[in-house]
Image: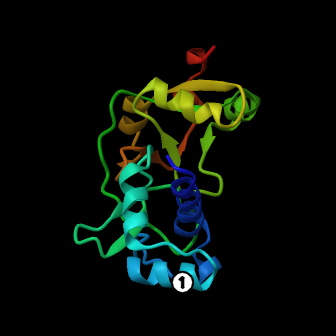
Amino acid sequence: MSDDHKKLSKFLSYVLRHHPEAIGIELDRDGWVEVAVLIRQAAAHGRVFDRALLQAVVANNDKQRFTLSADGSRIRAAQGHSTAQVAMNLATAVPPPQLYHGTAERHLAAIREQGLQAGCRHHVHLSADVATALQVGSRHGRPVVLTVDAAALHAAGQAFYLSDNRVWLTDAVPPAFLMFESQAD
């Protein structure tokens, strides 16, 4: 990914996931904003880019963090929102039997006590594979991968959602549904 792509990706994450007010945009309840409005408001705040660069960043983002509408007129972050403007109406989905959560080793004591909490985000993020969870965990320190008994949690009534970029989401994971023995070395 080029430096321009990386900078724009970080900027888009910031405004589309966390602080749309920073450039004076308003996201709808599902996180969408008109591309033309985003480009105009970003330029008014010193971040100049065109539709072609935006489309390239969306298409080439390794984590597929952003989604363009079918007609290309709107954009949103696929998941990871912390702004109150967004309450994405995702359909519930039946998760696979096990999902994985990557975190840093220093968070284990709190997770053993409280389970996985959404924190400032709307949901806990889970991966369908260990490799992705390991990559996520390594961003925050020495990585640890936890196994989530998604089948049992779902059977207990917990809702799961699958985001546009294939990240599994749920409100929380109590400690009883976590297996700590799948720690990464």
Q: Secondary structure at mark 1?
A: helix
The relative height of residue 155 versus residue 130 in the rendered view (above or below) is below
Camera sees residue 1: yes
Name the residue beneath numbered marker 1.
Answer: 41
| The C terminus lies in quadrant | top right
Residue appearing at x 61%, y 32% in the figure: 137
131 or 116, which lies in front?
A: 131
The relative height of residue 115 versus residue 54 in the rendered view (above or below) is above
Residue appearing at x 39%, y 49% in the figure: 60
159 or 90, which lies in front?
A: 90
Residue 44: x and y in percent read 59, 86
Residue 86: x and y in percent read 49, 70
Around disc 1, counting alpha carbons within 10 Å, would you say few (fewer than 14), some (14 to 19), or many (20 or more)? some
131 or 125, which lies in front?
A: 131
Is 117 positioned to the left or the right of 49 in the image?
right
Residue 75: x and y in percent read 38, 69
Is 114 positioned to the left or the right of 125 in the image?
right
